[in-house]
Amino acid sequence: MKVKRNKKLVSPFFLATLALLVFIGFAANSQPLEGAEVERGFLLFFKFPSMTVGIEEKIDLNLIVVNTGQKEEEILLSVIPEEKAKDWDVGIETGWPKKQVHSVTLLPREGDDILTLGFYLIPPEEVEEGAYSFVVKGTSRDKKIQHSTTLDIFLQEKEPVPEEISEIIELVVNYPSMENPAPKPFEFVISIMNNTEQNMILELGADIPYGWRAQASPRWEDENISSLKADANDTEIILLTLIPPLTVSKGEYPIKFTVEWQDKKQSIDLKAIVTGTYDLKMGTETGLLSLYAIAGEKEILDIYLWNEGSAPVEDVSFFSIDTPKDWEISFDPEKIASVPSYLQVEKPEKVELSIVSPPRSLPGDYLVSLRSIGREDQTDMILRITVRRSTLWGWMGIGIVFIIIASLVGVFVRLGRR
């Protein structure tokens, strides 16, 4: 018996529907889900990671740091030069006024998630031509994320090119060299003249010695500025204030003030001359400002003079002021040619003070004022001197009394016999 089996044909509609569903699923899987973003991450990079520059030329670049995640990130920054570049002066800094940067904090929201930092390199004086590499490393505070970028610098000799001086912007300062004791600030009044027919935005900058601080402000105003608007055919006057560190040494310090616009710049050279600080001090070895003296006898007291400033005080002489009548006061030595900074010599100058009060001085307390005067500074010290009578006079008094009593006894004895 033959059995006939019915063959079921697949519906064309079913096949079309299945193909459509497969295509939709594939398309959905091939597209990232909206809102699926990286939770944590950051990038750091140079726009120009490879450069050729001249020897003895300072290199200034922009280092860009971006927070690509959805969390606030504190990123620790460090610069790792290769072995042959270890003598280079390199660093990361803010804009102007320039300050060293060791870490940055970036927020996830737009506008606060990217930061442009300054990156500078200064080759040593005896540097040779060739290629030098520097790695800038960024590490999250918890050390779970690390990224780095490499900068390649190619040094080569180049013929000096006369600096093109732009007459579009002129810088004028009446007193380009100033002299102040440390740490008094230096204030330069600078006129910036725009000789064009259009308004311009000028970026301000200054090359200053390490450890110094600089700030610019409109004249007669207290606001710090890093750029200004210069109207056409007009002059803007600013005040450039330079603040040396407390430990600055005596000497001359060159400063270059610069304004930049578009691809041009204009600069002016300034000079800050630090004369040092002067702070004379005078005292005794124990710190006590009192002395016991015998009337008519010489008393010797060692006093010490030192300078807590940073520069020496020259031609120091010693004097007594408001000395009691008939007192004799002298100093040995009477003059000191120079008293250097105590931070340098770590020892004071010793002076021997000699005091002689009159023999008939009444017992009691007397005040003696001492003064040391140098070319740059002076200081005073007041001594309280307690005068006592000599014990010799006491014994002489006792002897006189004894003689008187003995004489009286002799007289009574003679009268009694009679």
Image (cartoon, rainbow, N blue to C red):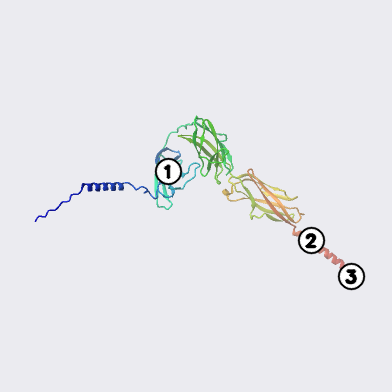
400 or 293: nearer the viewer: 293
Q: Identify which amino acid the numbered label 1 is placed on.
A: Ile
The residue that label 2 is drawn on is 397
Residue closer to the observer: 159 or 108? 108
396 vs 12, left or right, is: right
Residue 165, given in percent of the width and then of the height, sits at 49, 31
- Point out the residue furthest to the bottom here: 417
Density class for disc 2 (Cα within 10 Å; few <14, some 14-19, many ≥20) is few
Q: Is residue 412 left or right of residue 252?
A: right
Q: Which residue is mark 1?
A: 64
- Badge 2 element: helix
Question: x, y (%) of residue 280?
Answer: 63, 47
Quick one: 205 or 236, which is closer to the camera? 236
Residue indicated by mark 3: 417
Please report whichever mark, 3 or 1, sits nearer to the chain's N-terminal start.
1
The residues bearing labels 1 and 2 have C-alpha atoms spaced at a distance of: 95 Å
Dot 1 crowding, Cα within 10 Å, few <14, some 14–19, many 20+: some
The answer to which image quadrant residue 175 occupies is: top right
Regarding mark 1 in the picture, which secondary structure is present there? strand
Cα separation, mark 3 vs mark 2, equals 31 Å
Report whether 256 appears left or right of 348: left
Residue at far top of view:
197
